Image (cartoon, grey):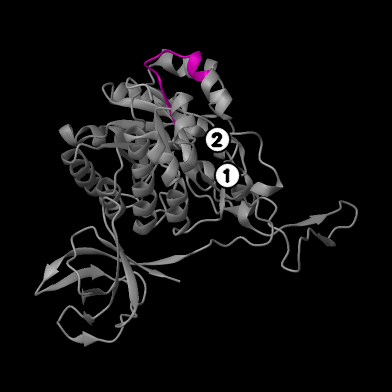
Amino acid sequence: MNSNIKKPELLIPAGNPETLEIAVMYGADAIYIGGDMYGLRAKAKNFSMEDMRKGISFAHSHGKKVYVTANITAHNQDLEGIRKYFRELMSFGKDRPDAFIISDPGVFTIAKEEAPDIDIHISTQANNTNYATYRFWYNLGATRVVSARELSMNEIAELRANIPEDMEIETFVHGAMCIAYSGRCLLSNYFTGRDANLGECTHSCRWKYHLVEETRLGEYLPIEENERGTYIFNSKDLCMVEYIPEMINAGINSLKVEGRMKTALYVATVAGTYRKAIDDYFCDPQLYERNKPLYKAELSKGVNRQFTTGFFFGKPTHKDQIYDHNTYEKAYTYLGTIKGERDGLYNLEQKNKFSVGEEIEVIRPGGKVIKANVIRITDDEGNDMESCPHPKQNINIDIGEKLFPYDILRRKE
């Protein structure tokens, strides 16, 4: 491998302060987050201004970057609020964001006025499908453009060859796919009045549909693969962990993971696996090749809809869709994240029920996985419990192993 090739950035999503810290500890180079407004994930918990300031400070203290999404398609009534939003973020001083992710030209203009020293990355929502578009944004002052998910590896390589060397390409490499072009979808707005382009997508593409012939209104013609119906827009999830060399050779600077609404277990699993894959490749390409089955196996333990390579190697076919259901595959259940130690027990906020005697696994930063049995569970007052059935309850556990903050507990299903 050419020693002059630079490692690509690993960019991980965070929907709340907990997952931001997990992303940092499990190997992200940068994290993208959204505030209470102006980012396209209204149903994510998102960050208050104070949470954003603290989160950015935490990431910076570990040498990581944070990008803030402001990628809505803005209406007139949004503009003054967006201006105020950028001013507040600038008031963070040394803990201000490292970049804004923007799709709307009006929002772009306001960001340049209010935060001239902050990098601007152009969101995939802006439909960035060719090198002329990249040049357009570069000439306006953008430092990075997120490629449309519909681009092939060859198109990205051609794009790289036709844009300035110092312009960065960010590309989605893992997570949920969208049926609409670059995520610009009207289905949700049409059916529910909740606009995907304002952050309120209801994931209408995952619903079950029938056909109606225009002269036979009310007569629903099923689209069937089996007795459960067909989810005709339901794509498998993207997974490119087996193609790190190809993405580097195509000139991609930042490998982006989707999932600001996902759990800490998802963030830790995906961040840790891609971190190891990237590092293995740069340590020894043969080591990377040998470990490919391990990467895929570990990612399969997270919640997913099976995997596809999307558009990278040609247009998707029926093999890249799931027609018979719209549910996730779930190999493991997230139990909680260790916060600290108390009286020889380890504290966490319970996310799903588990019981004394159960076998669980512990994953930790760096990729180590420990199997153990739950020996003891107590509540906050030290009372012993046989199980912990109440989500978000603070509990203390003993599994016969020393645990550390940011260790994550999971149970095989």
Query: What residue would you read off at disc 2?
Result: 149
> Residue visible at 46% across and 42% down?
241
**Residue 153 position within the rendered picture, expressed as x and y whole percent measured from the top left:** 55, 28
Give the SS element for disc 2: loop
Q: Quadrant of residue 96?
A: top left
Residue 103: in sight, yes or no?
A: no
The answer to which image quadrant residue 58 occupies is top left
Q: Which residue is mark 1?
A: 178
Left or right, 327 with respect to 82, comes to right
Left or right of 117, for residue 69: right
Q: Which residue is depicted at the point 42% across and 46% down?
A: 291
Q: Residue furthest right?
A: 215
- Above or below, 315 relative to 222: above
Q: Is residue 316 above or below residue 367?
A: above
Label 1: how many Cα within 10 Å (few below 14, some 14–19, many 20+): some
Q: Earlier in the sequence, mark 2 or mark 1?
A: 2
- Gap in angstroms between the C-alphas marked 2 and 1: 9 Å
Which region is colored magenta? 159-170
